[in-house]
Image (spheres, coloured by chain):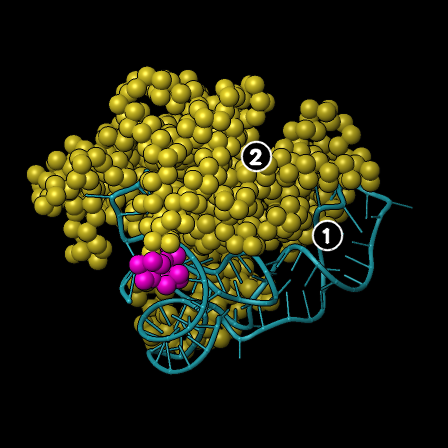
Amino acid sequence: MPVNHARTWNLKLKPRKAGQALKTVPLHPQNQRMAIVSVIQSAVSAQISQLYQVNIEPSSITVSETKPEFEGDYTVVLFALLKTLKKKPEELGTELGQALVAGNAALFSGFNVIKGFLNLAVSDSWWLQFLKEQYNNADYGRQPRNGQRVMVEYSSPNTNKPLHLGHLRNNFLGWSVAEIYKANGYEVVKTCIANDRGIHICKSMIAWQRFGNGATPESTGIKGDHLVGDYYVMFGNVLKEQMKPILEKKLAALIADGKTEEEALKYLKDKKDELEKEAEIMQAAQQMLVDWEAGKPDVVELWRTMNSWVYKGFDETYKRIGSNFDKIYYESETYLLGKDLVEEGLRKKVFFLKDDGSAWVDLTGDGLDQKIVRRRDGTAVYITQDIGLAHEKQKEFHCNRSIYVVGDEQNYHFKVLKLICQKLGIEGADGIYHLSYGMVELPTGKMKTREGTVVDADDMLDEMIREAKKKREEKEKELNKTAELSAAELQELDEIVGSGAIKFFLVRVDPQKRMIFNPEESIDLHGFTATAVQYTYARTQSVFRKEMYTGGEPGADLLPLEKEMIIKLERYADIIRQAGDEMNPSAIAGYVYEVAKLYNSFYNEHSILKAETPVKKELRLQINQMTAHVIKSGMALLGIRVPDRM
RNA sequence: GGACCGGUAGCUCAGUUGGAUAGAGCAGCUGCCUUCUAAGCAGCAGGUCAUUGGUUCGAAUCCAAUCCGGUUCACCA
């Protein structure tokens, strides 16, 4: 079917937990450094081998950050080693500690043993060397290209209504996971499937045709996706009206038939979909779907027109939230794709035919059920399209992994999809991964279109930006911090803060968990929020407006907070890897906030520009710079910008 | 009923392959702006980690059962 797509969605994205180690290609030598934890593991392993002639795999040695209440920076947990080495905890800790300090003077400056824990102090010189190498590396923590390619599909809107809060979580997750994959060295293809055809699309079309009086986004001044969404809602209302007499009649018949009212109501509820087919307006919508599939010119034309309104509206929203895609698939172009594969599956005996001619796959051996893949009338079902699309994606991009960012109500669907693709031997089937996330709910429960409790994405953004502006204007009365900014710059600032707040709020929670969206709390710009992190970044820049680092020597020793800062910053590389392994942007969000919080303590405790000595000033300016880089880089992985002043 | 997911402070959430006295934010209470940005900092208070049993040097974390909440098991998508 000829389809005209006059839209221009731009885009990008990334995934999680890879079972395989990264094959890194050396490109940036400064990014090839070994993490401190690995350095310690290797040193301990080597020392054990020397002292006791026993080989212990470095990665199997537990090394963690020392708890604040103890002396030291990193802790080796000895319990696991006691049996193999036949030592008592204190004895082993002491022997190992002495040998480690004696043999690695540049690395360790001291140790203590408490119970089965060997606490090691890493020397100031090691941290200073690290700072020297990395403080001005804006790409610290990012890995060189590893030659692997990953596809991330996210967003996937229906073209019959505007985006809502659930779509925002999906978009931010998908986008961020894509960026995190890139930071881990993968090439990423961000994709989206536009669900642009089907009975739900016809519903808005019918309603517009009947009640629209030729209304357009231009004539009404309503954003296209919202306008179409209004007609979708209108369809629902009309249908409800038409169902009333039908249901009443049916109810009376059932009761006359001897059923109790309760039984009858339950029956009607179960048969809701079937009964709706008796409503005139529903029949009209179904006829329209038939006409669309037959390519009836006026229907196709209306479909194109209304979809173009929606796309235009989506483009605006995507632009505001900074979402984009490298490749967009349209269901109108892919919905027939899986049909050949059904034939192939039948030949390969992956599928089988039932007596009525429908085609099925039997997954009972995999702990699942039988699943239909082709209706008896020969048409494809949802899963069939997805099989076809998976095949199509591989033909074009040959990705090592293919991530689908889709809500957890489709867990079963994706389990089935992967299994079928594997059985069919589709390339890349093993790389299919469903990044499942929990629903966004309100304190009052689920969002329901019928009850008008759906939080609209555009409204949400408007409200957050309004809040950011309000807060900024309050602050301006106290301190004239943003006085030098133009009106346009101020507006951009409000957008950075407002959209950052909603992004951070949705992305800071473990994707897997469903989350409660409390409008009042989300609007708060204090505490564990993007705003606090952005504010911290603005502070670093405020310092640099007064004075820059020179690149000179930062001295030989560190105060506790100075060292804590460097230790925290060093961890960033590991956090990126972890967030990638787990496909979990919340790991980045939590870390970036920790950096900001620690920096604020540091900032409060030690003056940078009025440091005790010029050497201390240089040290703190370098810490200031690395903090700024890490915050900016980490926030960028979440799709959140940071302002120079606020 | 089968399968899968969740249950941690009043609320919203962290808690790495099992490690030391379970952490943040919000809300509540005390202090701190003549200073590099107070959208911040320091502190107080707040816990039967759903329950029970098990594994072991050690369990919020692993196993089993139970309770509570959610999702799913369509010739819808």
- Can you give x and y, in whole percent of width and height, for residue A483 in the image? 78, 30
Chain of the residue displaying label 2: A
Query: Which of the two discs, 1 and 2, labels the residue nearer the N terminus?
Result: 2
Q: CA distance from mark 1 to mark 2?
A: 41 Å
Disc number placed over residue A397 in the picture, else none = none
Task: Give the quarter of the image for residue A2.
Answer: top left
Decide if residue A218 is on the left or right side of residue A289.
right
Secondary structure under the numbered disc 2 in the rendered image: helix
Mark 1 or 2: in front is 2
Tell me the colour chain A is drawn in: yellow
Residue nearest the viewer, comparing A567 with A251: A251
Query: Which residue is nearer to you in this view: A312 or A22?
Result: A312
Report the amino acid beneath label 2.
Asp
**x and y percentages locating residue A221 in the rendered image:** 59, 22
The image shows residue A87, relative to residue A439, as above or below, that is below
Q: Is residue B42 above or below residue A360?
A: below
Mark 1 sits on what residue? A605
Q: Is A257 covered by the magenta stretch?
A: yes
- Kindly report the secondary structure that dominates the magenta region of the rendered protein: helix
Q: Quadrant of the C terminus of chain A?
A: top right
User: What are the residue bounds of the magenta stretch?
Assistant: A255-268
Q: Is residue A194 visible?
A: no
Residue type, mark 1 in image:
Glu
**Secondary structure type for disc 1:** helix
In the rendered structure, the answer to whether residue A191 lies left or right of residue A104 reads left
Q: Give the residue at mark 2.
A: A458
**Chain whose colour in the figure is cyan:** B
Residue depicted at 37% across the width and 54% down the height? A252
Tell me the residue at 18%/56% (across/down). Answer: A364
Q: Residues within 10 Å of mark 2 (few under 14, many from 20)?
A: many
Residue A266 lies within the magenta run: yes
Q: Chain of mark 1?
A: A
